[in-house]
Image (cartoon, coloured by chain):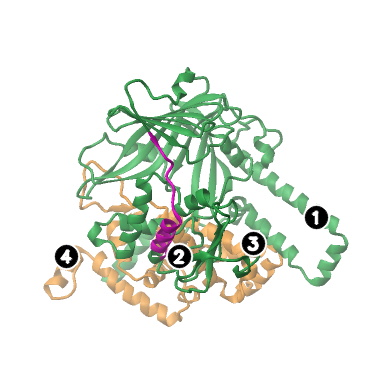
Chain colours: A green, B orange
Amino acid sequence: MTHESETDRLLQAELGSVPTPDFSEWCQKYPDAAAGLQDSSRRASGNAERARDLQKGTEVTTGRKKFMSRMRWAIAAILMLITGVSWLNFGGVSLDPKAFADEIPGIDQVRQMTWTVTFYIRVSSRDGKSSWVEKEDRLFAYRHPGQYRETRIDRSGKVYKVVISDHNAGRILELQLKDRKAAIKVLDHQQDPRGPFAWYGDALRGRDLPGSMRVKSVSMPGPTTIDGADVNVARVIVLDSEVGKRTRLDMYFDSKTKQLAGTWTPNSETDELEQLEKQVRPPQDDWGSMEPLAALIHNIQLKPAIEAGEFSLNAPEGYALETIAPPTVTEDEMLEYVRAAVAFNDQAFPDSLFSAFDSDKLNTEWAKKEEDRSAVASALIRQVDKFRMREIYQSPVQRFVTDNTVPDSFQFAASGATVGKADQIICWYRLKHGKVLRGVFGDLRVRDISESELPFSITK
Amino acid sequence: MPKSDEELVNAACQGDLASFGLLYERHYRMAVGVARCQLWDLHLSEDAAQEAFATACQTLRTLQNPARFPEWLGTICRRTATRLAKGQSKYEPFTEVHDETSDTVLPGLRRDVHDALSSLDATAREIVMLHYFSRLTYEEIAEVVQLSPQAIQGRLQRARAKMAEFLEPEEASLRRTSAGQPGKKP
């Protein structure tokens, strides 16, 4: 046997062959795509037909509605076949927003609840030759309206920090148990006033999600078990158009009580709970780096024994109290950050200043030793670190806009442009202080501008 | 006489789902092969191919030259696979005993086969995958990667020779090494 035929034989044997295509299965999996093809052809039909359609516009609209209704029915029917259950007791078989119309315990009308979040973390050895998975728990409690208590537990299982936030008061109390220190801070974000998991209901019911997030799909992969209980899974794929990232959110619903029993949110869509659980090892002291892989919400209790005092913003006796002003970002700092991000992007402006760089690319640089990083990566990492040390965990541009500009006055209009054009306005905003209109130019200098200098009317 | 890609694309653009179905069945093997060059895992590659067809279906009307459907679909498939590959785990599972001689490195692929394919440039790897895995003819591969069938044959020969360094039997490798020829890579 020649080497060539041996190579042929090995490749064919190892690679196998492509399974037979199944177009009807594809149609069921991507009903919108198939429907879109037929729908777009209808829209793109010739002028004569279009004129005819215009004359009987009502009929066309009605026809399309019927068509979409059939599509929804088909999707729902497929999902019903997959799950084989009508576990949420919704009326009919359509998976439209009415599908989850009934109140879902744990999502809607929550008055108080407790839950555990278990983080799965990839830990690598100092020499980078081996890695394993460790778990870290955080305990949460919620009391309507807007009070949260978070208990953080270290790798050895001891409580080291308690964070109490009151969204009505707009304050947060942090307790460092070991040092007996307490800090009062201003809350820098708002939780959904309807409850901690109310937005899950929005996702399931096909409603709008906050910001740039939208629901791509909702499916029901079938039953599983969590904490020993039988649950049904509803899988929601959420798209963040600004960051360009898909997130998988598996919601677990108790098959008997229909209550929300937990969620699974892996960073990588393909990571499964069972798979990571098998890799879990006890915490080890000798480690080099950590990377969060997934979060499991479980152990949800809707009638827990929690006292109002557990949400008090009063520092416990014996704790040294410190009051900390809310962290913010100045205009100069914002521009310095954008400058670093743009340099990292090969001098190109991103699609959105709120997501100013490719985080995967920066993570790759982060994993390197400092001396091996590129200069532009090091500069950006210094910027990101600076704001994280300040406890700003959102985009510094976003924080600057929130803190310092008139709502809805910030506009960015330089996606994909390269840095340097001193006469091109890339973004503009009106400062809260004095209502001054400011323009940032392509060379990242900023100055006061008039409305007539804008590339288009701000009323647009 | 089977309809050409151009005829099927034009019919699909008129809303004929069956024609798109024929395109799907005709080019599915190619799409999975292109995706597998980046994803390795067969099931994930099928997902990528199916998603690429969904994208193609939704944007079919933007295709300016319907005769170049395979090339266009291949591009969509590469992009889809790249995006999905970003979501793949960068780590191997922790094992109690790390066996350096273990053949298993990725789902369904032996280490030496994976290494052999990884040693090729992207185009050569795609040609090899489309030939051995998707079982396409030289002409069909040529349509996807925009090379002539003769060029495909030449690239395939060179790729095969390079991969033989990884896949040939150990004794043959040692014989070639002692004779001053390139042997099996460590």
Q: SS for tag 3?
A: loop
Seen at 73% across and 48% down, the residue is: A70
Q: Is residue A338 magenta?
A: yes
In three-dimensional space, the C-alpha distance between marks 3 and 4, rounded to whole angstroms, equals 75 Å
Location of the C terminus of chain B (image quadrant): bottom left
Name the amino acid type tagged 1.
Thr
* Labels 1 and 2 share a subunit: no
Left or right of A417, for residue B39: left
Q: How many marks?
A: 4
The amino acid sitting under disc 3 is: Ile
Q: Looking at the rendered structure, which numbered label has been put on residue B171?
A: 4
Residue A127 locus on image (x, y percent): 19, 49
- The residue mark sitting in front, 3 or 4, is 3
Q: Secondary structure at mark 1?
A: helix
Near mark 1 (Cα within 10 A), the count class, few <14, some 14-19 or many ≥20, is: few
Q: Which segment did they paint magenta?
A: A323-342
Label whose residue precedes the other's in the sequence (1 or 3): 1
Q: Residues within 10 Å of mark 3 (few under 14, many from 20)?
A: few
**Residue placed under numbered mark 1 in the picture:** A61
Say which of marks 1 and 2 sits in front.
1
Tell if the residue under mark 1 belongs to the same chain as the one under mark 4. no
Q: Chain of mark 4?
A: B
Above or below A298: residue A246: below
Between the residue at mark 1 and the residue at mark 4, the CA separation in whole angstroms equals 73 Å
Q: Which mark is residue B34?
A: 2
- Could you say whether the residue bearing mark 4 is in a helix, strand or loop? helix
